[in-house]
Image (cartoon, coloured by chain):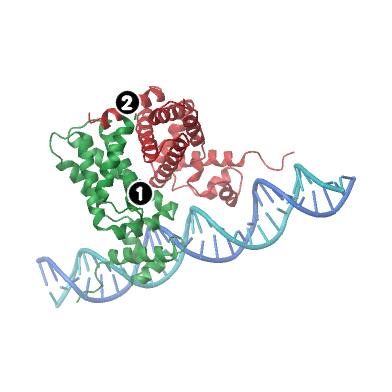
Chain colours: A green, B red, C blue, D cyan
DNA sequence: ACGATCGATGTCAGTGACTGACATGAACGG
DNA sequence: CCGTTCATGTCAGTCACTGACATCGATCGT
């Protein structure tokens, strides 16, 4: 028989998202999250570096980096980036309700927004590294990656909006076309 | 005679930058900063929302928003954004040593990087609003602003690098041209 | 001139995030 | 069967941050 209930990190993440949604992020103590997951406060901090990190455990970065690595040899940097955005869009499309709940918690708290931004920044750095791996030089690699993140952010905001039922991938592709138009001076 | 020494926020900011540079951000307590400025810990928190905020008191946002508002009527969104980046570059050029010290402290601490990112994000939001004020519609306004921030970030990193003695404004203009090339598929 | 008010500061006690040190006990390899 | 490992618990401590209340020159109205 197992000594402990399985998947402690998952239970903690679930309890945290629920409580953050019910009472708000600041009104929730780590002790409460741990109690709901049947664990001690100390164990929470063994699985997550801090109270915010529990909302950012995903694996989108690996997915997008892989998409860049797998892009066809002849693809321009911006096209490899577009493939990565497509991959992320597809992943999120499957978890739309989870994404919406999580985003509404983040939108309500500046500290969580900070964490989200640094995650996106790390993602941009990883994408730039993946581009360099393909032989793209700086600053083209960083600018391409940053452009991809900008497109992702704008598209995500439009997609998550309740009134908008279009697939993420469509919104993302449209947003990229619009960025191209903007930087072309139109 | 004045009841207190003048410019409490300025003294606190100076003491904080010095101490963060000497011992590192995490190894510095707010009590130490306040003591060096001849004030109480409580007073620190009356002037700055938290221990990080003391490094982010500048007025670059107003400057860049004004540059967008003042751009010629016929200017394309990306050109108004370019004018804003030029203005910021000129401001920072005059404070190069301060900017370098501050940046080396920020570079050493993820928490400070988070704060910097959310400041840049707020800046992007304000620039987008200034563009909308000029009649630019969404998502063009947001994408133009994000593109400007991406250029600013890349250019700043290259300019602050010790080996690089080129004026910020030159680096910034070159970076914008490179972003244009990237999104054009080159 | 003088009292009422204001505003920047100080003091103090409290909460909660996070950390380090040490203990526990089922599982697992040899 | 025994020693090690590993996920967890317990406990004490530090420090960021907050609310409540006190202080006392400066300032304003009369």
The residue that appears at 34% across and 48% down in the rendered structure is: A158
- Please state if B90 lies on the left or on the right of A122 as rendered: right
Count of all numbered marks drawn on residues in the image: 2
Task: Indicate the quadrant containing the C terminus of chain B: top left, top right, bottom left or bottom right.
Answer: top left
Give whichever of A108, A125 is nearer the camera.
A108
Residue located at (27% from left, 37% from top): A177
Q: Is residue A140 above or below residue D20?
A: above
Of B21 and B156, the residue lying toward us: B156
Residue that numbered label 2 is attached to: B177
Q: Position of residue B146 (x, y in %)?
A: 37, 38
Give the label on residue B8, or none.
none
Q: Residue A144, position in %: x, y? A: 27, 35
Disc 1 is placed on an element classified as: helix
Q: Position of residue A106 (x, y in %)?
A: 39, 55
Q: Are marks 1 and 2 on the same chain?
A: no
- Within 10 angstroms of label 2, few (less than 14), some, or many (20 or more) residues? few
**Residue topped by disc 1:** A157
**Residue A18 sits in which quadrant?**
bottom left
Q: Along the horizontal axis of the image, is D4 left or right of B117?
A: left
Q: Is residue A144 visible?
A: yes
- Circle nearer the viewer, 1 or 2: 1
Which subunit holds the residue at mark 1? A
Q: Is residue C12 left or right of residue B92?
A: right
């Amino acid at each position: 028989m197992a000594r402990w209930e399985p998947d402690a990190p998952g239970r903690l993440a679930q309890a945290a998202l629920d409580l953050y949604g019910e009472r708000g992020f600041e009104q929730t103590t780590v002790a409460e999250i741990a109690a709901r997951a049947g664990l001690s406060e100390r164990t929470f901090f063994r699985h997550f570096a801090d109270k915010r990190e529990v909302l950012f455990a995903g694996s989108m970065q690996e997915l997008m980096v892989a998409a860049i690595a797998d892009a066809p040899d002849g693809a321009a940097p911006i096209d490899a980036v577009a493939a990565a955005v497509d991959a992320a869009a597809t992943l999120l499309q499957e978890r739309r309700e989870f994404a919406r709940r999580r985003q509404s918690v983040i939108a309500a708290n500046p500290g969580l927004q900070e964490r989200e931004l640094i995650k996106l920044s790390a993602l941009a750095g990883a994408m730039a590294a993946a581009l360099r791996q393909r032989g793209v030089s700086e600053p083209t690699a960083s600018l391409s990656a940053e452009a991809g993140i900008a497109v992702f952010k704008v598209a995500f905001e439009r997609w998550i909006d309740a009134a908008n039922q279009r697939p993420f991938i469509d919104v993302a592709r449209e947003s990229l076309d619009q960025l191209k138009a903007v930087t072309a001076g139109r």
